[in-house]
Image (cartoon, rainbow, N blue to C red):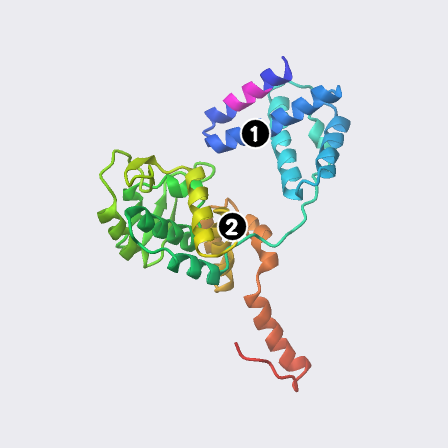
Amino acid sequence: MSPNDLLDRFIISKEAAACLPNTLSWYRMCISRYLEWCGSEGQEYKKPDTIEVYLASLRKRKLASSTVSGYFTALTAWFTWAYQRDYISDNPLRHIQKPKMIKRIKNRVPKSDFDQLYASIAVNKWSDQRDRCILLVMFYSGLRVTETISLLPTDVDLDDQMIFVRRGKGDKPRPVPCHPSLAIELPIYYEMRPAFCSETLFVANDGHGRVRGPLSAAGVRMIFMRRFANAGLPYRNPHAFRHAFAMEFLNGGMEISAVAAALGHASVKTTESEYAHWLTAGLKREYTEALKRVSPEATVPKG
């Protein structure tokens, strides 16, 4: 069986396991690029040495360590599946050490920027009100952009102030609390938006005030680019709102297990790995208390 046929079989297997379309596309992209590189370099794709040379080539291209690690993860999933199905006699990834990831400060939206962005949206038409609701959902509930655009009106319980994510990453549903302001803003959006056939909560504007259909992830990115520019702020992608939710609420004292549940992480360890390095509120409190003992004469500014 050719490597490309093996890739097709792998994608079918993952599709049968209910992997999300974005995940399937990511697997195909990572593995296809590896196979294309093997073909151009005349390398045998199943050799550990080949994989190591490929990963090294990605680093030479100055790709982020998280990107290189992502390629390694995709290849690991593919080769492990092929080995378990007896398509290959050995799993070459078991001979290779996982690339190290450099922890970087998360690209997040500071609370002050969010407040400025939110306040900059004057509601003159229904799409303005839609954008205010999207900002509230993504900043205060930490939803992924794909989860946000997949919401149905029935997924939002304004009485209990809860959002029900029906199909999160890994096809795992979860409830997430929402900001009280959404109970005010969302009914206004319902009242302002035109009649439409789409089942989704957030819909796209055709540029003439009419509904074009369900809002897409690319549409959300375009909205954010325009809104950040109008507010005089540097652009941040939609995922930066998810990082902001995690860091704001962790620094605000929310238990990390609760934040992990809200984010839809399979394990608290994932949340710790992603965010624990950059928490400051608890560190400042501990430092202030210790400073009183280490240097009683020190004056600690308030606030």
Compared across the picture, whether 165 is left or right of 95 comes to left
Q: Residue at x 41, y 55 (%)?
A: 140
Along the line of sight, the residue nearer the viewer: 133 or 293:
133
Compared across the picture, whether 259 is left or right of 4 comes to left
Q: Earlier in the sequence, mark 2 or mark 1?
A: 1
Which circle marks residue 27 in the picture? 1
Residue 139 figure quarter: bottom left
Which circle marks residue 236 in the picture? 2
Residue extent of the magenta highlight: 7-12
Q: Is residue 84 above or below residue 210?
A: above
Along the line of sight, the residue nearer the viewer: 82 or 37:
37
Compared across the picture, whether 280 is left or right of 41 comes to left
Quarter of the image that includes the N terminus: top right
Q: Secondary structure at mark 1?
A: helix
Percent of width and height locating residue 121: 36, 55
Q: CA distance from mark 2 to mark 1?
A: 25 Å
Identity of the residue furthest to the bottom in this view = 297
Badges 2 and 1: C-beta atoms under 8 Å apart? no
Along the line of sight, the residue nearer the viewer: 121 or 274:
121
Crowding near the residue tagged with mark 1, few <14, some 14–19, many ≥20 C-alpha atoms within 10 Å: many
Q: Residue at x 39, y 43 (%)?
A: 148
Q: Residue at x 60, y 76 (%)?
A: 288
Three-letter code for the amino acid on which mark 2 is drawn: Arg
Q: Secondary structure at mark 2?
A: loop
Percent of width and height locating residue 155: 31, 44
Which circle marks residue 232 in the picture? none
Q: Nearer the viewer, mark 2 or mark 1?
A: 2
Three-letter code for the amino acid on which mark 1 is drawn: Tyr
The answer to whether residue 72 is seen in the rendering is yes
Percent of width and height locating residue 200: 31, 38
